[in-house]
Amino acid sequence: MKINAKMLLYILSTSMLIFISSIGYITWKSGELALSEAQEIANKNAREYANIIKSELSSDFSITKTLAQAGQAYHTLPWNEWNKTFLEQQLNIINENPHFLAVATSWELNHIDPNWDKPFGRYLNGWGKDQSGNINQIETRLNTEGDDINGNYFKMKSSGISMIIDPRLYSPTGNIEDQYLNSNISVPIKSGNTFIGLAGVDIDLNRFQDIIKKIKPFEKSYSFLLSNDGTFVAHPNLELMGKLISDVYPDLNEKFSIDEKVKAGENFSFTHKNKQKQKDFYVFTTIKIDGVDTPWSLAISVPNKVITSKAKSILYNALIVCFIGLILLTVVIWIIAKNITAPIIKVTDILKDLASGKIDDSLIMDVVSKDEVGEMTHALNTSINGLNKKTEFANLIGSGKIDTELELLSKNDLLGESLINMRNNLQSAKKEEENRKLEDQKRRWANEGLAKFSDILRKDNDNLEILAREIIKNLVYYLKSNQGGLFIINEDDGSTSIFNLLSAFAFDRQKFIKKQVDLGEGLVGTCAVEKETIYLTEIPHDYVQVTSGLGGANPNSLLLVPLIIENDVLGVIEMASFNKFDQHEIEFVEHVAESIASTLKSVQINIKTSHLLEQSQQQSEEMAAQEEEMRQNMEELQATQEESTRRGDELKGTVDAIDSFLLKADFDLNFTIQNANESFLIKFKYNINEIIGVKAENFVAKKDLTKFQSILNKVMSGDSHQGISHLKTKSGDKLKLITSFTPVFIDDKIDKILLLAIDINDFK
């Protein structure tokens, strides 16, 4: 069988089977589908009108919240002035919102009255409308005897949460026929986290009755509005206004917990069989204002029989449409089968040519349709174009153009990926060859440089300055940098923390710059401390300036390499350049630095050795002269020692004579005894350990203290004193002595006081 015949047979037979099955299924499911659709319509209407009511309440809440936020600034003005201004704002609000029955603020007395020190009591001030619509001021003090813990004000005061108060019937005249339903929206006024009062508005709820009347998605359906506690806010039956749903429909409320779910802010629905044994569908949609924990709920009730009658009508229409569709399907299948087979035949011929290896633009087909056949034709054309491009790509790669790009047909284009991998491998091989040549070139450059500097280091190694100049000049040339310097540690004075700029070179001329750098100072000192190479490409603006015949500019790179040998830093090489240093150039300078450090160490040792030899020769000559001078001095010293020994013997005899005849004691500058001879100790009845540290006034009677103190003052001024003194022994015995107090000087300063005395009683 041809393709078109197969399509007619298979599709029509399948369609008939599906049609028969569908009729039975639709008959069984149409009622349920219609019911589900109707319920969704009811839900949609409930959500739509719930948002309208929410918008109305949110607007009122926003006004109240704005009033509360404005009240937080009460402390910015004196209370009387603030109260007057804020009262005018509340009057404007009630005038601009006709559905507001009252606008007022309640203030905690302990925040506005400095004389009120109780935690309860409030001041109510605002505006309200009477039965004639006139606006009158409200002003009073409430809860002055204590808070009503069951009242809404205390709940908000304790929790700090805004509320929409459950509605209540209110009659301005007191007559039942004048009653209307109203509610209150209240928002706490806070200072930080402290409750200081609240702002509230009373709103007329009659406006929601008009909204309820508009909600009628189906015939005989109706809607109603419940507050947070289940009070009817709006209902087609006006007699239910202000009543609780638990009182009006106790069985329905008990079975489905309507009032509890409304209070919890839940969206829910259910089907209930009424007293007439007919089912009604109820849907409840919550109305919750942001910032308020007392949600309301909008409910819609729809009779099920209204829904099913509409479903039956839909079913009959569906049967007619399905029958007509079956006829049209037969015609369309025949046309499609004919249109499909023609291009398939042509595609088959092209595939045969591709199988034989033919690839050129003559195989491309014109794409007429945009269906699957058109997609198949387009895919075939894409494959042919891709093969053409791959053939061209392979030819270019074969001719050596390995940078040629190839666009893959998709992520699954394996042939294209293979060709690209081939090209990438060729590119990698070429790049590796170039890198190898570059590495060989760098290695040759480094080896030639090391050989060059080995020759330089072998020359002039007996003159440090010439060697340094040759090193830095050749480094500047070899690295093609712009400027360089060689810093050497200063060991002339034994210092190991100062580096001298021994040589600097720039632009084919030596730069004579006197410069010293302390260890740790700047980049040079840091390089010496850390003993590591420093390479910078962002140079501080005022660090160094490279100059040329055309002017001066900051270098683009700076390289500092320490000269280290046996972990000791001998110096630092500093190179500056407009060009950036490559890694192999940095490594080259580091290798050269090792050789330079070794050579510098040898040069320094040679210089020190030469200097030491000169010093040794000079010191030998000086020592010979000093030996002759020392010999003469020794002879003079020997004569002096003999004379000193003779005088010492004389002095010792004199001292011994004084000690045997006179009482003697040494006082320090605080007139405390430091030493005493045997005669003094016997006369005053002390031993040597007891008398050391005794004050001079301990030897004087109280009546003679003033006179004795004047004697001590005279001696401390540098004069001697001789006279008769009345002193006492350790046991209190009185002595009459001829005394001499004499200051002893060393280097023109008084060192101690010498006391010499004779007891008069010994010579009566």
Image: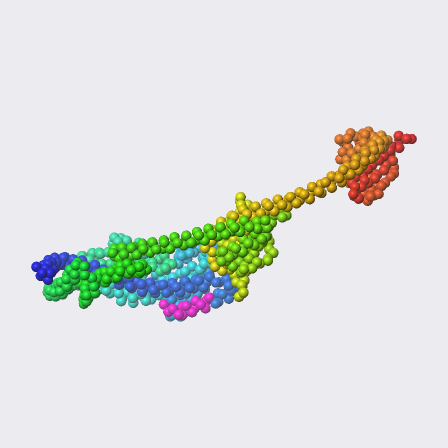
Residue under the image location 41 percent in, 65 percent down: 103
- Residue at left offset 76%, top offset 33%: 692
- Rendered-image quadrant of the N terminus: bottom left
Q: Nearer the viewer, residue 722 or 164?
A: 722
Q: Is residue 231 visible?
A: no
Work out which quarter of the rendered image holds the C terminus and state it.
top right
Query: How does the figure colour the protein chain or chains?
Result: rainbow
Q: Is residue 448 magenta?
A: no
Residue extending furthest left?
Answer: 1
Query: x%, y% of residue 231?
Result: 31, 59
- For the residue pair 606 and 757, the one nearer the viewer reads as 606
In the image, residue 90 lies in the stretch drawn in magenta: yes
Specify start and end residues of the magenta stretch as a single range: 86-99
Q: Residue at x 13, y 64 (%)?
A: 342
Q: x and y percent of residue 317 in the render?
A: 14, 65
Residue at horizontal 42 percent and vertical 69 percent from the top: 92
Residue situated in front as seen by the camera: 178 or 331: 331
Number of residue marks: 0
Q: As displayed, is residue 676 above or below residue 409? A: above
SS assignment for the magenta stretch, majority: helix
When asked about the image quadrant of residue 140, the answer is bottom left
Q: Position of residue 749 (x, y in %)?
A: 79, 43
Depth check: give the residue in front, 514 or 53: 514
Q: Residue 716, can we see it?
A: yes
